[in-house]
Image (spheres, rainbow, N blue to C red):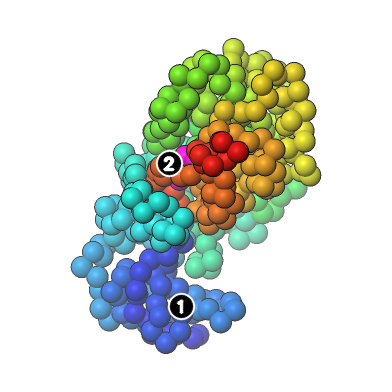
Amino acid sequence: MENINFKIDHIDPLGQGVSKEDQISFIEKTLPGEKGTAEVYRKAKGVIFGKILSTDDLAEKSAHRVTPECPHYYECRGCQYLHTDYSNEIKFKTQSLERMFNKLLPESLKIKVHPAEKRFGYRNRVQIHYDLETNDFGLISSFSKGLIDASKCLLPSESINTVLKNLYSNGKWKEIINKEDNKQGYIEVYQKPDETDPKISVNKPYAEGGFTQVNDSMGVVLTDLVTKMYKKYMENSNKPLVLDFFGGNGNLSKDFKNANIKVYDLYIENETNVEIQKENQHYINIDLYKKDPVKQIKNSLKNIELPIPDLVIFDPPRAGVKFIDSYIRYLDASYIFYISCDPATLRRDTMKIIKNYDILNIHLIDLFPGTRHFETLIVFRKSDFFLSS
């Protein structure tokens, strides 16, 4: 076992403390100013990754450190910020976003932060793994030799937790597994906002019951914010054309008034929202990660008198928008709303977008309290130079 001494300078976008003491190292569950000894768990390209096992590994503690409410915090990698209070968590998330975008944003533009309503009890979806050979059921973590008891997790909602505790009771999780086919696998417990009771799926694709944001209340904050931006910049337009990419059930654009909305995503053939089009939302089945999606998109607009969109919305997976250059060049939208759960791919795509667009505002929406994750919304407007050219 190898150890390394550290002194934490700042927190990175992954929620890790960054030390420059002897060489660059990233130490989990630490805070700026803290010193101590960490156990090295990985080395990659000359960079060291370490963890502390408890506060006993700290020679100097931050005044902002608190005792985590979760009993599994130091062995679980699901949360990154429970060793400090929520106000500090928000500060670290904001600072990491500022650090990534400080050279891309106008000097006077500040990040608008939307903190979560509650830190715990918000997740409407959890995935619990099982191993019939070891009789184990719980959360996976590379810091733990076995699976971690999920019944003590603080993040699931009350209704999800009720189901989890029932699954743990007398090993009831075994009763819903096909023991002959799957010695190892996972059980997903999920609840959509319009459903009264959680549902359970076994060894099915993630969100097989249909994707929704894992935080219902903050999902509403995000949707309301996108609608507010639409009203601010677009609602006075005459029947604006809106293209909603990776749009799923069209939740982000559903409240846009006076708009002609095309929602693009990869849908299964019998999915309801593809069969039954809404009054101002038309759903179009396109795999946006396949070759040349923009050509397919332009074909879907060929019967529209003015096929140049007024607004394009991107809400992609963590990988970001493939072929972003083609979207910018050929769609030529007046505005772009880009929603991202990964600041790194957002920054990569932003660097291409700002060649033709200005950033009007940027928002941090904390949909995932306790963890390093959050959503970012950036509003882009086509630059005056390109509008007049």
Horizontal side, residue 65 vs residue 100: left or right: left
Q: Which residue is mark 2?
A: 360
Would you identify the image quadrant in which residue 199 lies? top right
Q: What label does residue 25 carry, if any?
A: 1
User: Secondary structure beneath disc 1?
Assistant: strand
Q: Is residue 89 visible?
A: no
User: 313 and 273: which one is in front?
Assistant: 313
Asked whether 2 falls inside the magenta stretch, the response is no
| Badge 2: residue crowd in 10 Å (few <14, some 14–19, many ≥20) | few
Horizontal side, residue 101 vs residue 81: left or right: right
User: Secondary structure beneath disc 2?
Assistant: strand
- What type is the residue that disc 2 sits on? Leu
Foreground tag (1 vs 2): 2
Residue 177 position (above or below residue 252): below
Residue 105: give x, y in percent of width and height: 42, 52
Q: What label does residue 300 carry, if any?
A: none
Count of marks, rendered view: 2
- What type is the residue that disc 1 sits on? Ser
- The magenta region covers 376-380
Residue 39: give x, y in percent of width and height: 45, 79
Horizontal side, residue 331 vs residue 227: left or right: right
Q: Quadrant of the C terminus?
A: top right
Residue at the image point whose x is 42% and y is 41% from the top: 360
Residue 4 position (above or below residue 120): below
Magenta: main secondary structure: strand
Residue 213: give x, y in percent of width and height: 50, 37
